[in-house]
Amino acid sequence: MTPILSVRSLAKTFVDGEHTRQVLQDVSLDVAAGEVLALMGPSGSGKSTLLNLLAGLLRPDSGSIALTLTEGPVLLTGLSDRELTRLRRRRIGYVFQFFNLIPTLTVRENVLLPLELNGLGHLEAEALQRLSALGLDDRLDDFPAHLSGGERQRTAIARAMAHRPDLVLADEPTGNLDGRTAEQVARMLIGEVKTLSSALVMATHSDTIASQADRVLRLDERVDGARP
Ligand SMILES: Nc1ncnc2c1ncn2[C@@H]1O[C@H](COP(=O)(O)OP(=O)(O)OP(=O)(O)O)[C@@H](O)[C@H]1O
Ligand SMILES: [Mg+2]
């Protein structure tokens, strides 16, 4: 099967004053439709960096990232910033490590925003149903500041899935939930990805959550140059 996401020989170095830090080196991966890849590795090993590269929020030093969409293949690493923004808005759902909910919008408005931006109003009932399945029925009119960390996280998951993205990127999507809720939420996220035939790349520190994935990619901590 043709993978939705194909990554070849990705490298990323951060330069910070006189320190250079090679965070990712020669990373290659494929994720097919309906497939879940868990990213594991110690803190600082580059999980969030890799997800930001896959989202087109960061540019790699070298290597390629390609998405195969229904209308054909797109080389992310060959797009302009503007094209990347457009592609991300429509095709990618991102559950950020620190949620990135819009503070001036309610839970409902945060989740419906991707539909508004994409002219996908017909998916509204489905998006609200997802919020309900995530146990947020009675928080729809609340602002993010009034939610617990776990409630924010579940809102971020509902927002990432609202527009039925081809590629879902999730950065420790259950990191703020208790063990049982974490397992339930991960199961729901994975179930949705399979139903929608999206591809999911999910960073996690939890072996239990990773065991729900189809495959695991481990990033090792790799540091060139001095640590502060
Ligand atoms: N913009 C940046 N400038 C300089 N260094 C950065 C930048 N972003 C990340 N790094 C460094 O890259 C390394 C990897 O960071 P990253 O956030 O990808 O790790 P992670 O695996 O997601 O860790 P965690 O499990 O703690 O979330 C870290 O050493 C970090 O300090
Ligand atoms: Mg991280």
Image (tube, rainbow, N blue to C red):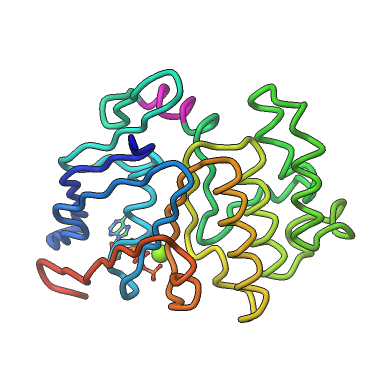
Picture quarter containing residue 66? top left
Q: Please say if 34 is above or below 153.
A: above
The mark tally for this picture is: 0
Viewed as shown, does residue 223 lie left or right of 69?
left
Viewed as shown, does residue 12 lie left or right of 115?
left
Picture quarter containing residue 60? top left
Q: Position of residue 40 (x, y in %)?
A: 35, 69
Farthest residue, direction top: 71
Farthest residue, direction front: 1
The one nearer the camera, 36 or 104, is 36
Q: Does the magenta stretch include residue 83?
A: yes
Magenta segment range? 81-87
Tell me which residue sits at (51%, 42%) in the image.
Answer: 198
Tell me which residue sits at (37%, 20%) in the image.
Answer: 72
The one nearer the camera, 182 or 70, is 70
- Main SS category, magenta section: helix
Tell me which residue sits at (55%, 48%) in the image.
Answer: 194
Q: Please say if 94 is above or below 25.
A: above
Q: Position of residue 105 (x, y in %)?
A: 76, 45
The one nearer the camera, 65 or 46, is 65
The quadrant of the rendering that contains the C terminus is: bottom left
The quadrant of the rendering that contains the N terminus is: top left
Of the four image quadrants, the one with ligand 2 is bottom left
Viewed as shown, does residue 217 lie left or right of 97?
left
Q: Is residue 29 magenta?
A: no
Tell me which residue sits at (25%, 43%) in the image.
Answer: 7
Q: Please say if 39 is above or below 192.
A: below
Q: Position of residue 178 (x, y in %)?
A: 64, 80
Q: Where is residue 93 in the image (x, y as percent from the top left)?
A: 54, 43
